[in-house]
Image (cartoon, helix red, strand yellow):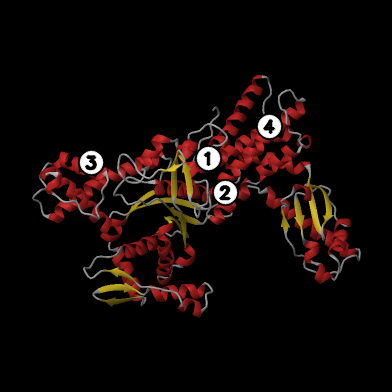
């Protein structure tokens, strides 16, 4: 579980602190100064592997020129037994440290030791985190937005788990409310069109127009004939809704399973209503003074809750007063609870009943106005929604073919469905492409590029690097060259820029995983893998392996095998396969 980059930074800080004490003892630097400054990795390797600004940060307190401080620190610094081979002064007073062979060997040893779990940490401190994603209405096939949300949520949960969180994946099934009523009414219209003729029964303008609704009506008719034609309307609608949900939800599960996604739980909105939990939650908001009645409905004082939230976050009263804030209906005059009321109850259930420390929701960007309102409502319940509800807002997907947007599905007349997409491209390509950019950026999904087998296709580029290494290892094994253990590898023989760059990139995986978890941005792993594959291809082109001196061959073979392991590791986080042959 070592993070060798953080360890190196910590050793720089330790060395400068020890050098300062030695310089103070020698009377060269003044005592009692708190060492500050940062330790960074320079963008240009010519400036060393790590750079400390401690001399410049201490100039004012020591009343000395930064370069003079830097010189005193260098003169009293002992690198013996450390991971660094040298330290030099640069620019206005930077201390530039260069790594020695031991560190490079340690990287390979750590990858060997941790294997497929290399990069794991306890940064998450066992925090219990639910990741809720997709949660598509069960009224039709899943579309491109659901496909992107699926891979974002699934990969983010994997990354949070690797970063030390206790994660839980959940799908929230909206099987209650207006959209289910409209779903049932849509099937009902198609059902009566079967019975009476299409021209005899008008279809509701705001109904669901896809062919899947016609198929559901046909299947319902095949199962029940005209037995529901004269039934009580509510009885018929309830039967149609139940039939549609029983048909659609298994299809959704099958599509997501094909896509490589399995949930810990499918949570049904209807259970919140049936148990009285929505009513109880609204009652709690009323008890706390956050509701009022108007026009026969029960309203949430969202305006005041948001004002409290924004003031707590540092906005001024003047700024808050300028905001166009509105209240929300929780219970309509007809006695039905709104979707917002159910959503508050659902998130209360996550945080209070099931005890998650945080809930991370992946939503479409069109829901951005809902985020602060829901957080504020949870604040009103005393659940600190402003900090415990994290919402990742996801931008749109632009599907392209032959350079042109693809907007329609031949089958449904609506947006391309997930199962249609997976008939055209591999699951690996779909998952990699949808996660290729941060959630806040739109994704251009090029169908032609996704099926190409060349370096222009990013998933092929990374997978090919893995397969190339597997082939290399297999061929060398046939010649009697096995991958050595890290302890038997002479890291001091790997001195070319291509070799050292590759090892430094390998060392970054723990940092990338933590940053992806911290920023809720799983696309960092895609970018890292593309960079690692590129570094390997350059290494392979510049550094001969087969036919080299045995010690050099063994060292480079170990390096290649370490890359293979890390590529498979990172692809696994994305839910993408690491093929051994291509």
Which of pointers 4 and 3 lies earlier in the amino acid sequence?
3
Label 1, on which residue? 572
CB atoms at circles 1 and 2 under 8 Å apart?
no
Query: What kind of element bears circle 3?
Result: helix
Can residue 90 be seen in the rendering of this structure?
yes
Q: What is the number of the mark on residue 104?
A: none
Q: Nearer the viewer, mark 1 or mark 3?
A: 3
Counting residues from the start of the chain, the first of labels 4 and 2 encountered is 2
**Label 1, label 2: how many angstroms apart (C-alpha)?**
14 Å
Marked residue nearer the N-terminal end (1 or 4):
4
User: In this figure, which residue is indicated by the disc labeled 3?
Assistant: 215
Q: Residue furthest left?
A: 230
Q: Of callouts 1 and 3, which one flags the residue occurring earlier in the amino acid sequence?
A: 3
Front label number (2 vs 3): 3
The residues tagged by marks 1 and 4 sit, at their Cα atoms, a distance apart of 23 Å
In this orientation, which residue lies closer to the viewer: 256 or 158?
A: 256
Q: CA distance from mark 4 to mark 3?
A: 55 Å
* Secondary structure found at label 1: helix
């Amino acid at each position: 579980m070592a993070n060798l980059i953080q360890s190196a930074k910590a050793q720089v800080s330790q060395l400068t602190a020890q050098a300062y004490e030695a310089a103070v003892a020698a009377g060269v630097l003044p005592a009692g100064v708190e060492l500050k400054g940062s330790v960074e990795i320079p963008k240009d390797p010519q400036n060393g592997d790590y750079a400390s600004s401690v001399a410049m940060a201490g100039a004012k307190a020591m009343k000395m020129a930064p370069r003079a401080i830097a010189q005193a620190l260098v003169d009293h610094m002992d690198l013996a037994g450390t991971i660094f081979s040298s330290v030099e002064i640069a620019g206005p007073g930077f201390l530039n440290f260069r790594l020695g062979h031991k560190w490079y060997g340690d990287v390979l040893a750590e990858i060997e030791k941790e294997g497929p779990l290399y990069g794991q940490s306890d940064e998450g401190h066992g925090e219990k985190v639910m990741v809720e994603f997709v949660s598509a209405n069960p009224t039709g096939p899943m579309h491109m937005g659901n496909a992107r949300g699926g891979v974002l949520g699934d990969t983010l949960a994997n990354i949070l788990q690797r970063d030390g969180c206790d994660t839980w994946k959940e799908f929230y099934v909206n099987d209650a409310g207006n959209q289910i009523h409209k779903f049932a009414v849509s099937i009902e219209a198609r059902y009566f069109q079967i019975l009476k003729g299409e021209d005899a029964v008008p279809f509701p303008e705001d109904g669901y127009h896809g062919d899947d609704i016609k198929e559901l009506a046909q299947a319902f008719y095949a199962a029940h004939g005209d037995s529901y034609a004269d039934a009580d309307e509510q009885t018929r609608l309830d039967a149609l809704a139940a039939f549609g949900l029983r048909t659609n939800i298994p299809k959704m599960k099958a599509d997501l399973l094909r896509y490589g996604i399995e949930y810990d739980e499918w949570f049904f909105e209807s259970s919140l209503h049936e148990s009285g939990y929505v009513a109880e939650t609204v009652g709690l908001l009323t008890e706390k003074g956050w509701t009022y009645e108007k026009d026969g409905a029960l309203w949430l004082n969202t305006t005041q809750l948001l004002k409290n939230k924004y003031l707590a976050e540092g906005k001024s009263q003047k700024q808050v007063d300028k905001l166009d804030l509105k209240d929300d209906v929780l219970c309509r005059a007809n006695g039905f609870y709104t979707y917002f009321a159910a959503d508050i109850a659902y998130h209360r259930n996550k945080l209070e009943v099931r005890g998650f420390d945080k809930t991370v929701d992946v939503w479409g960007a069109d829901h951005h106005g809902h985020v602060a309102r829901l957080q504020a409502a949870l604040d009103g319940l005393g659940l600190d929604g402003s900090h415990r509800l994290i919402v990742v807002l996801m931008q749109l997907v632009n599907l392209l073919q032959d350079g042109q947007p693809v907007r329609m599905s031949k089958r449904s007349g609506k947006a391309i469905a997930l199962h249609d997409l997976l008939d055209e491209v591999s699951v690996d390509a779909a998952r990699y492409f949808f996660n290729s950019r941060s959630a806040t950026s739109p994704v251009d999904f090029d169908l032609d590029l996704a099926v190409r087998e060349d370096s222009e296709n990013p998933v092929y580029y990374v997978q090919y690097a893995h397969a190339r290494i597997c082939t290399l290892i297999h061929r060398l094994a046939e010649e009697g060259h096995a991958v050595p253990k890290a302890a038997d590898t002479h890291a001091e023989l790997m001195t070319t820029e291509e070799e050292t760059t590759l090892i430094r990139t390998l060392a970054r995986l723990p940092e990338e995983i933590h940053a992806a978890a911290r920023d809720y941005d799983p696309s960092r792993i895609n970018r890292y893998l593309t960079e690692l594959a590129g570094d390997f291809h350059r290494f392979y082109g510049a550094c001969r392996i087969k036919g080299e001196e045995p010690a050099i061959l063994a060292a480079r073979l170990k390096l290649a095998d370490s890359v293979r392991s890390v590529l498979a590791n990172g692809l696994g986080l994305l839910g993408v396969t690491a093929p051994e042959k291509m």
